[in-house]
């Protein structure tokens, strides 16, 4: 909200970011504090909530389980996909540091031998460390969205680093599973096949992701019931940031929250 302080914001997705969409703003992210705040709402109203979208946070899971006992929990698909993308980037960064060290060693050797250092370049003009640095964004995208230069760079990258090709394939196949309009049972089968691929690949970061998914398996599969996501929450967060920017920052936090409530918490 301001000065790096975090707030937990609860919204009603059915109001589409308009008046009466704001349910609660709680200081901090501790589950106990949020639960205490939401307990001020009559239990009959809390029991009417049918579905809650959330991230993989254990504290959020506890809040939903305690305050909305009849609601279906749905893990946001974009948080799931981000974990896989982060795992690919982690591997790329590790290779990049190795490439930087290798280039430094070659430069030092050239200096000791009294010769000019000329780095090796691939057919697209990239050095090894440039190849790894410039591949960051293409690894976030589907192959059909690559530009011609990105397609060439990916070809070289995957040729030189087969493990990155495998990791990208795992991330991409997970993206395809989540974007496919299908029923829950079919998604369960697809996810099981994905787990098998992760096990065969043997990448530690992806094994950690698979273990995390296993802990939240049912909540992840609940996505296929209504295909609900955190998009509404992210949109509302953007509205708050825009409102704060229009005021050129927050001077009086209590007054800012009062204005926020007048706009989004009460009927117009």
Image (spheres, grey):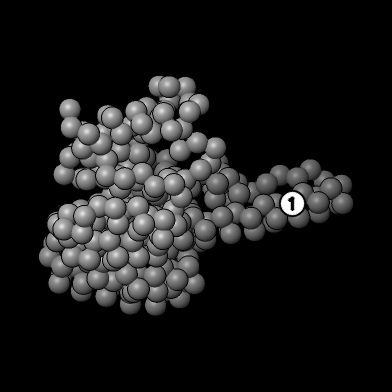
- Percent position of residue 67, x then y: 27, 61
Going 21% across and 37% down the picture, which residue do you hit? 20
Identify the image quadrant of the N terminus: top left
What residue is shown with label 1? 104
Residue 146 visible from this viewpoint = no
Pick the front one: 145 or 110: 145
Q: Quadrant of residue 48?
A: bottom left
- Percent position of residue 249, x then y: 48, 26
Going 48% across and 28% down the picture, which residue do you hit? 252
Identify the image quadrant of the C terminus: top left
Q: Secondary structure at mark 1?
A: helix
| Left or right relative to 212: residue 194 | left
User: How many numbered marks appear?
Assistant: 1
Pick the front one: 119 or 237: 237
Residue 133 visible from this viewpoint = yes
Q: Is residue 71 above or below residue 146?
A: below
Q: Quadrant of residue 257?
A: top left
Going 43% across and 33% down the picture, which residue do you hit? 254
Label 1: few (<14), some or many (≥20) within 10 Å? few
Q: Is residue 154 above or below residue 56?
A: above
| Left or right relative to 237: residue 86 | right
Pick the front one: 90 or 155: 90
- Percent position of residue 99, x then y: 64, 55
Pick the front one: 232 or 48: 48
Going 45% across and 75% down the picture, which residue do you hit? 202
| Left or right relative to 55: residue 191 | left
């Amino acid at each position: 909200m301001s000065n790096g302080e975090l707030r937990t914001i609860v919204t009603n997705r059915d109001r589409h970011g308009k008046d009466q969409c704001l349910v609660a703003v709680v200081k901090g992210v501790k589950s106990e504090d949020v639960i205490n705040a939401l307990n001020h709402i009559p239990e009959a109203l809390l029991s009417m909530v049918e579905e809650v979208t959330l991230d993989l946070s254990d504290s959020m899971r506890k809040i939903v389980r305690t305050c909305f006992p009849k609601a279906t929990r749905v893990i946001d698909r974009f948080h799931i996909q981000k974990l896989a993308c982060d795992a690919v980037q982690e591997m790329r960064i590790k290779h990049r540091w190795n490439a930087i060290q290798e280039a430094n060693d070659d430069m030092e050797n050239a200096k000791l031998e009294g010769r000019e250092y000329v780095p090796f370049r691939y057919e697209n003009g990239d050095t090894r460390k440039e190849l790894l640095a410039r591949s960051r964004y293409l690894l976030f995208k589907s192959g059909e969205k690559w530009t011609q230069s990105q397609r060439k760079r990916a070809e070289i990258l995957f040729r030189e680093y087969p493990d990155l090709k495998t990791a990208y394939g795992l991330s991409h196949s997970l993206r395809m599973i989540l974007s496919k309009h299908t029923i829950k049972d079919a998604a369960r089968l697809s996810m099981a096949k994905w787990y098998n691929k992760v096990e065969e690949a043997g990448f530690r970061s992806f094994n950690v992701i698979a273990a995390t998914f296993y802990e939240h398996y049912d909540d992840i599969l609940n996505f296929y019931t209504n295909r609900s996501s955190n998009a509404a929450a992210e949109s509302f967060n953007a509205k708050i940031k825009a409102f704060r920017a229009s005021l050129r920052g927050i001077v009086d936090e209590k007054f800012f929250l009062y204005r926020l409530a007048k706009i989004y918490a009460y009927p117009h």
